[in-house]
Image (tube, helix red, strand yellow):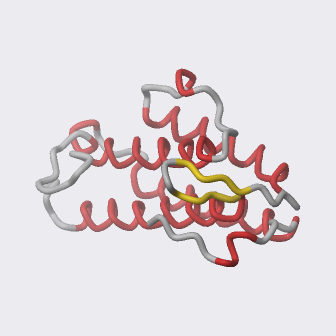
């Protein structure tokens, strides 16, 4: 989780940022296809053993984590501007990410926060994979039959 690879030191290119934007859009499309239209009762059903309690908690975690990646580099919008509504949070953070990504092109900034090294490339890598992993996790929960 705290990995910092040699590749993470390299500046992002314009092509890589466009590819990242594409992957983030695909990820969000899959996440929305998985959860939009779910009843509040499904979103809020406690899942035994789930650290974030329920699907709504996992969704909040996805949005908060993406915001947190920007915060590691000192580039996040103020914490108090995060929405309590999970779908608004997801939308606002993703819009922020898509707008700000081009600003990272060519940048070589790295920083250490709480003992973990961060760079622009690591922010992008983590944002892409984190949402994907949790989308698949939610899909597995929904297919498990626990919400019937």
Kindly identify the residue that appears in the image at 16 percent across and 52 percent down: 47
Residue 79 vs residue 29, the one in the foreground: 79
**In terms of image quadrants, where is residue 122?**
bottom right
Which quadrant of the figure contains the C terminus?
bottom left
Residue 107 vs residue 113, the one in the foreground: 113
Residue 116 visible somewhere in the drawing: yes
x and y percentages locating residue 133 in the rendered image: 43, 66
x and y percentages locating residue 102 in the rendered image: 83, 53
Kindly identify the residue that appears in the image at 57 percent across and 23 percent down: 81
Position of 37 with respect to 45 (left or right) is right
Position of 97 with respect to 86 (left or right) is right
Kindly identify the residue that appears in the image at 59 percent across and 59 percent down: 117
Above/below status of 133 relative to 94: below
Residue closest to the far bottom? 6
Residue 37 vs residue 75, the one in the foreground: 75
Above/below status of 46 relative to 105: above
Position of 98 with respect to 105 (left or right) is left
x and y percentages locating residue 129 in the rendered image: 52, 67
**In terms of image quadrants, where is residue 21?**
bottom right
Above/below status of 57 relative to 48: above
- Number of marks in picture: 0
Residue 25 visible somewhere in the drawing: no
Above/below status of 119 relative to 82: below
Position of 109 with respect to 137 (left or right) is right
x and y percentages locating residue 137 in the rendered image: 33, 64
Which quadrant of the figure contains the N terminus?
bottom left
């Amino acid at each position: 989780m705290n990995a910092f690879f040699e590749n993470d030191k390299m500046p992002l290119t314009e092509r890589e940022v466009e590819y990242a934007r594409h992957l983030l859009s695909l990820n969000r499309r899959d996440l929305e296809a998985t959860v939009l239209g779910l009843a509040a009762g499904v979103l809020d059903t406690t899942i035994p053993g789930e650290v974030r309690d329920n699907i709504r908690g996992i969704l909040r975690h996805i949005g908060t984590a993406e915001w947190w990646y920007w915060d590691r580099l000192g580039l996040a919008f103020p914490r108090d501007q995060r929405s309590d509504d999970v779908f608004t949070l997801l939308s606002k953070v993703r819009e922020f990410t898509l707008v700000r990504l081009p600003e990272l092109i060519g940048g070589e900034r790295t920083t250490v926060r709480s003992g973990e090294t961060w760079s622009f490339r690591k922010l992008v890598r983590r944002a892409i994979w984190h949402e994907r992993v949790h989308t698949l996790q939610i899909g597995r929960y929904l297919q498990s039959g626990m919400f019937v």
